[in-house]
Image (tube, rainbow, N blue to C red):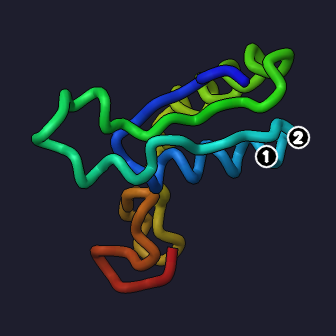
């Protein structure tokens, strides 16, 4: 096994694990119960770790994680009704209320 990623947020680690599993890379999450020790031990020691079971897949796992972290910002969307620019996170146009 080989450590490929570490982060303090368990949701992010779970997402990374799922993305790697979709690629056929089996993973194991460790240190997920150390959050309660925050403040008692060094902060980096409480971070959750993502390990790859098969060390031969570690490089592919690291590359996939890098790709996920480097995803570019998405462009705004134009409303079909009023042509106003809306952030990609909006489902409804902030200007006219139309679904975007």
Q: Secondary structure at mark 2?
A: loop
Taking the spot 83% from the left edge, 26% from the top edge, the residue there is 54
Label 2 close to label 1 by CB (< 8 Å): yes
The picture places residue 27, in percent across and down from the top left corner, at 72, 40
Q: Residue furthest left?
A: 39
Taking the spot 79% from the left edge, 46% from the top edge, the residue there is 21
Could you say which quadrant of the image residue 57 lies in? top right
Is 46 on the left or on the right of 73, as rendered?
left
Q: Nearer the viewer, residue 15 or 94?
A: 15
Q: Residues within 10 Å of mark 1 (few under 14, many from 20)?
A: some
Q: Secondary structure at mark 1?
A: helix
Q: Nearer the viewer, residue 75 or 28?
A: 28
Is 18 on the left or on the right of 90, as rendered?
right
In this rendering, is residue 25 above or below 9? Answer: above
Taking the spot 37% from the left edge, 63% from the top edge, the residue there is 84
The picture places residue 83, in percent across and down from the top left corner, at 43, 65
Identify the residue under disc 1: 21
The picture places residue 64, in percent across and down from the top left corner, at 70, 28
């Amino acid at each position: 096994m080989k450590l490929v990623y570490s982060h303090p947020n368990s949701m992010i680690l779970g997402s990374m694990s799922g993305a790697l599993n979709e690629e056929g890379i089996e993973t194991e999450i460790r240190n997920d119960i150390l959050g309660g020790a925050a403040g008692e031990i060094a902060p980096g020691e409480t971070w959750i770790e993502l390990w790859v079971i098969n060390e031969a897949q570690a490089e592919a796992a690291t590359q996939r994680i890098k790709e996920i972290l480097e995803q570019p910002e998405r462009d705004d969307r134009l409303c079909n009704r009023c042509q106003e620019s809306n952030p990609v996170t909006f489902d409804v146009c902030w200007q006219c209320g139309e679904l975007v």
